[in-house]
Structures are given as C-alpha cells and as structure tokens.
Image: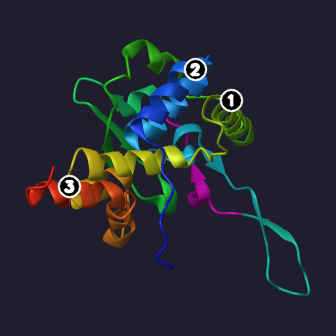
Amino acid sequence: MANKRIDFISFDEFQKLYKAAKDKKLKLAMLLGFGSGLRISEIIGFQRKFKHKTDKITKELTLLPDDSKIPPLTADKVDLKNHQIRIDDAKGGKWRVTVTSLALKEDMLKLLPIEIPRRTLQYQFDALCKKVLDKKMSFHILRHGFGNYMVNVLKLPITMVQGYMGHSDISMTAMYSKANPEAAINEAWKAMGGE
C-alpha cells in the first residue's frame, strides 16, 4: 500500500454540512458516516448481483453467493441506551460494534432502513459539499472524518478505533494518525513546552 496522506472532513466542516442539509435521510446517513464510522454500504446496504467469469470461452454472467450481500442498517441494530450500533454483515462478512453519535436520537431511527439508491445518496452529498464547502467530496470521506476525529482529536487508542471501524489490519487504522500531521506537530510542540 502506498504511503499517502488520506483526505478527511473536519468536525467543523461536518457541522456546516449537517446544518445545511434539509433531507432527513441524507442527514441521518451523514450522521452515521461521520458519527459512527459506517461505510455507505453498511448504512443503505449493498447487493452485487453479477460478476463476469474469467473463462474466455463462456464470458457469462453468474450470480454471486449470498455473502456478497450487505443488508441495510435497521433500527434493531441501534442501541441508544448503550450508545452502540451492531453491524452483523459488514464488508467481507465481518461483524463489529461501533459507537453512536450524541446527535443520534430515537425519532431518527424511524427512518431506518434508509431506502435510497447509493448513487443518489452520493450525488446529494456531493452537491451539498459543493454548495456549502465549495469542495468535491465522496460520501466515504465522512468515515475518514470519524477515524481522524477519534484518533487525533479525542486521542482514543488506535486499537479501539480499529474495532469501531472494522479494520482487520491495524495499519489501516494507523493511517488516521498520519491524517493530520499538523495537529500532531502542534501537540508535540506543546508537550515540549511550546505555546
């Protein structure tokens, strides 16, 4: 894997977007992405229906096995009392438990599952980013924002954030410690007695 800096959205940028969003489903999806680190596929579900065979003779389309399905998030997977979301069938068939956002409220759970096409959600988010922040952003940047916020702002242990995000390799989570080197330099400067 290349050692490149990842893009992320800051908490302030997220707040501006969240405040400007009018559609309740979009707001909830954004909150689940930034506030809980969920992938778009874990929020609205994902079903890859066909794949191309590599056999040069047949080149036929075949159905993928059931493990290629990721179900959408439903209200029964969200436990507001214990501040957690249970993801049973995430990317790669993995499961995990992640934290809920403080802004996630009981009445919002009535919108689950969010029934909106993936491309529509991405388009709405991109249009909102252009309008509010004058930036082009992918919905996935919300997940990066969650990781960056947990590691660099809240200073949670990387292993804890790894569990929230469902990374099987700690090096994936460690990328968030590099996401904001300016903040790390400022922290080191203060620790050495600088102002």
Q: Which mark is residue 131?
A: 1
The amino acid sitting under disc 1 is Lys
Q: Earlier in the sequence, mark 1 or mark 2?
A: 2
Residue found at the far right of this picture = 57
- Boundaries of the magenta span: 64-73
Residue underneath mark 2? 20
Between residue 28 and residue 81, name the one nearer to us.
28
Q: Residue at x 79, y 82 (%)?
A: 54
Instruction: Examine the image and state in which quarter residue 181 appears.
Output: bottom left
Q: Residue at x 79, y 77 (%)?
A: 53
Asked whether, in this view, residue 19 is left or right of residue 120, the answer is left
The amino acid sitting under disc 2 is Ala
Residue found at the far left of this picture = 193
Between residue 13 and residue 50, name the one nearer to us.
13
Q: Which mark is residue 187?
A: 3
How far, Cα to Cα, is label 1 from label 3? 33 Å
Q: Earlier in the sequence, mark 2 or mark 3?
A: 2
Instruction: Examine the image and state in which quarter residue 82 appears.
Output: top left
Instruction: Examine the image and state in which quarter residue 186 appears.
Output: bottom left
Q: How is the image coloured?
A: rainbow
Q: Is residue 67 magenta?
A: yes
Q: Residue at x 27, y 59 (%)?
A: 184
The amino acid sitting under disc 3 is Glu
Look at discs 1 and 3 and give the one toward the viewer: 3
Q: Earlier in the sequence, mark 1 or mark 3?
A: 1
Look at discs 2 and 3 and give the one toward the viewer: 3
